[in-house]
């Protein structure tokens, strides 16, 4: 029997940190959990041998039992609670919120002719259609064998088609905020009995401008998460609330997952979550912008000029020994098309993914990369989050991301699911007043072991990216096994955070 000290060491071994009070012990194995046998059988059939770190802690918290009006307690010792999960990309977090959700749905009356018009029991929100469709695929693996239906509501598809898919009802809806709001406004869907809500990639949703849509959707749900402390039952259980339909119902359970925890997401959590348990996995901590996944080795390299950048890109692809699939990130769709064209001329099979592509073309681009029809995917940040292509050996940031959060998400395309990756940053001496040393510089700045396979993420930085250089230096310096290259450490823009006002003032001085 493990004592408190043993559990503390266990959490440390898996880089799990929690706060929020009354935190249950993490899962040591699936068999020791209180998950119903039917769901355990599904987990086994999918091939999940051991829980990942985020699953070990998020599942017991997400499944802590509460009284449900009209439904007897399962007696499993699990408890439904609001959860904030902060985990690296590729950490298995989809299963971490889907498994508690399915246990919750099992405790409800079945969806039938009497209640399907009231909408789904559970809702999963994601920032992009690609991530929503990926979550739908994963959720169906678990929900399908249990007889539950999942429907995605995303842009790029006709509302009539999605209305047709909803005609028989669905226990689980996976949606992007903008399209879901549109569907609600059109009265195609109601959320009158939706009391389980998941916000995945919450930071990305806020960054993409969905905060107002999220507020609209959360306000459309039938109940607050939990009543205030003084309205709790004497035994500590939540009080019963009135739903919008006027019937007594289960208080809402809210789960929020995020790769980073910027202030905007913290504000959202404070407004809509009550007494949440906060789980932090690996190197990410509350209040920080977020750290790059530890399984990615980050490197910094200096190159001079765009032409040398293009030449260096081809040199890496032709002589670096990297196997497909490979992803190259850029900031504009015209750059994506240009890079893809240059690579094609050099003999590489490519596909592109950006906002200029329709839904069918985007799905075809990803499928081409997965099947090996394309060796290289050239993408904007549209693919920076949630797109999981197996065994990506190399990620190149041809243009530096606009924020350090986006940088973290980009390099998370490699170094996933327990495998190692490498991130290389290229700084270019563009036409600014800064003088960087001639030639190239490689430095490995972060590496951890990963199941025998390696991946590389390479970033090209120009001096036009000086607004993020300070953050990049801070990001690298957070790792105890990493070293900031002296060229970056000495760079003028890395000495203090460059604000837009400072940049405008400096540009004005240069022009004068």
Image (cartoon, rainbow, N blue to C red):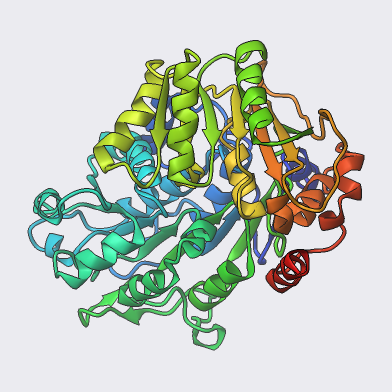
Question: Eyeballing the image, is 417 above or below 131?
Answer: above
Where residue 66 sits in the image (x, y, percent)? 45, 65
- Asked whether residue 1 appears in the rendered view, the answer is no
Q: Across the whole image, how many numbered discs are drawn on residues?
A: 0
Question: Eyeballing the image, is 272 above or below 340?
Answer: below
Q: Nearer the viewer, residue 488 or 252?
A: 488
Where residue 468 sits in the image (x, y, percent)? 71, 55
User: Which residue corresponds to the image point at 27% horizontal and 43% vertical from the top-left?
Assistant: 358
Question: Eyeballing the image, is 504 above or below 380?
Answer: below
Where residue 355 sits in the image (x, y, percent)? 37, 47
Where residue 40 sits in the image (x, y, percent)? 43, 34
Left or right: 393 in relation to 479: left
Q: Which of 181 and 272 is in front in this view?
A: 181
- Asked whether residue 273 appears in the rendered view, the answer is yes
Quarter containing the N terminus: top right
Left or right: 308 in relation to 379: right
Q: Pick out the residue farthest to the bottom.
A: 230
User: Which residue corresponds to the image point at 48% horizontal and 46% vertical from the top-left?
Assistant: 332
Left or right: 338 in relation to 423: left
């Amino acid at each position: 029997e493990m004592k408190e000290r043993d559990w503390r060491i266990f959490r440390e071994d898996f880089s799990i940190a929690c706060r929020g009070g009354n935190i249950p012990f993490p899962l040591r194995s699936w068999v020791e959990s209180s998950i119903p046998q039917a769901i355990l059988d599904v987990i086994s059939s999918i091939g999940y041998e051991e829980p990942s770190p985020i699953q070990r802690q998020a599942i017991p918290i997400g499944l802590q039992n509460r009284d449900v009006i009209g439904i007897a307690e399962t007696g499993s010792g699990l408890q439904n609670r609001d959860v904030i999960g902060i985990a690296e990309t590729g950490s298995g977090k989809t299963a971490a919120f889907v498994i508690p959700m399915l246990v919750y749905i099992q405790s409800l009356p079945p969806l039938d002719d009497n209640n399907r018009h009231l909408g789904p029991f559970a809702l999963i929100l994601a920032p992009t259609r690609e991530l929503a469709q990926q979550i739908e695929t994963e959720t169906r693996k678990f929900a399908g064998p249990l007889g539950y239906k999942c429907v995605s509501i995303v842009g790029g598809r006709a509302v009539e088609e999605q209305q047709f898919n909803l005609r028989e009802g669905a226990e689980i809806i996976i949606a992007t905020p903008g399209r879901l709001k549109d569907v609600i406004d059109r009265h195609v869907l109601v959320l009158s009995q939706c009391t389980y809500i998941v916000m995945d990639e919450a930071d990305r949703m806020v960054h993409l401008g969905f905060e107002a849509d999220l507020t609209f959707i959360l306000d459309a749900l039938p109940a607050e998460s939990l009543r205030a402390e003084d309205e709790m039952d004497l035994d500590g259980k939540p009080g019963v609330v009135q739903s919008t339909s006027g019937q007594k119902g289960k208080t809402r359970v809210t789960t929020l997952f995020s790769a980073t925890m910027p202030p905007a997401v913290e504000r959202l959590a404070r407004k809509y979550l009550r007494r949440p348990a906060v789980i932090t996995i690996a190197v990410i901590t509350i209040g920080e912008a977020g750290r790059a996944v530890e399984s990615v080795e980050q490197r910094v390299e200096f190159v001079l000029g765009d032409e040398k950048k293009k030449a260096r890109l081809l040199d890496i692809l032709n002589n670096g020994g990297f196997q497909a699939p490979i992803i190259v990130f850029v900031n504009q769709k015209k750059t994506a098309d240009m890079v893809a064209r240059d690579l094609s001329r050099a003999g590489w099979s490519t596909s592109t993914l950006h906002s200029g592509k329709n839904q069918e073309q985007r799905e075809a681009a990803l499928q081409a990369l997965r099947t090996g029809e394309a060796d290289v995917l050239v993408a904007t940040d549209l693919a920076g989050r949630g797109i999981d292509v197996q065994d990506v050996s190399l990620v190149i940031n041809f243009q530096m991301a606009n924020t350090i959060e986006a940088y973290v998400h980009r390099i998370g395309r490699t170094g996933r699911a327990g495998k190692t990756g490498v991130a290389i940053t290229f700084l270019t001496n563009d036409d600014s007043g800064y003088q960087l040393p001639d030639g190239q510089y490689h430095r490995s700045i972060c590496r951890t072991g990963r199941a025998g396979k390696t991946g590389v993420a390479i970033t090209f930085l120009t001096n036009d990216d000086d607004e993020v250089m300070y953050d990049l230096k801070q990001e690298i310096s957070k790792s105890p096994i990493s070293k900031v290259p002296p060229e970056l450490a000495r760079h003028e823009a890395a000495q203090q955070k460059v604000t837009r006002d400072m940049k405008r003032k400096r540009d004005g001085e240069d022009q004068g």
